[in-house]
Amino acid sequence: MTEQNVKTETLAETENYIAWKAEEPDGELTYHVELDGVTLHFFREEWAEFLKLIGSLS
């Protein structure tokens, strides 16, 4: 089995939560939000919609 390099970047972090993105080996960007024991995974289009949703809360 060949290990593939995935480039990751932290987007935001608090004491309990983290949002980060990953550049997959195939070039696809995925976004991830870790909330305690739950991790949400998003593709680029889903991430844009999620940010729009969160922005409308404030």
Image: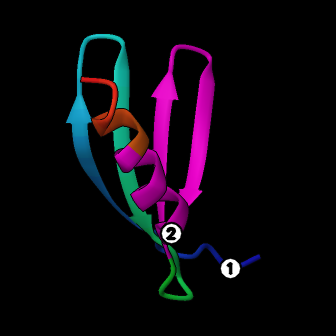
Amino acid beneath label 1: Thr
Q: In what quadrant of the picture does the C terminus appear? A: top left
Amino acid beneath label 2: Glu
Query: Horizontal placement of 13 versus 21: left or right?
Result: left
Residue that appears at 47% across and 87% down:
27
Task: Locate residue 39, reporting x and y percent.
Answer: 59, 33
Residue that appears at 42% across and 63% down:
22
- Kindly identify which residue carries mark 1: 2
Task: Locate residue 17, reporting x and y percent.
Answer: 37, 21
Label 2, label 1: how far apart the Cα atoms are: 29 Å
Q: Range of the magenta residues?
A: 29-52
For the residue pair 1 and 20, the one nearer the viewer reads as 20
Query: Horizontal placement of 9 versus 21: left or right?
Result: left
- Kindly identify which residue carries mark 2: 45
Residue that appears at 46% across and 47% down:
50
Q: Residues within 10 Å of mark 1 (few under 14, many from 20)?
A: few
Q: Are marks 2 and 1 in contact (CB under 8 Å)?
A: no
- Callout 2: SS: helix
The vertical placement of 38 against 56, above or below, is: above
For the residue pair 36 and 8, the one nearer the viewer reads as 36
Q: Residues within 10 Å of mark 2 (few under 14, many from 20)?
A: few
- Callout 1: SS: loop
Q: Give the mark nearer the N terminus: 2 vs 1.
A: 1
Number of numbered markers? 2
Q: Quadrant of residue 9?
A: bottom left
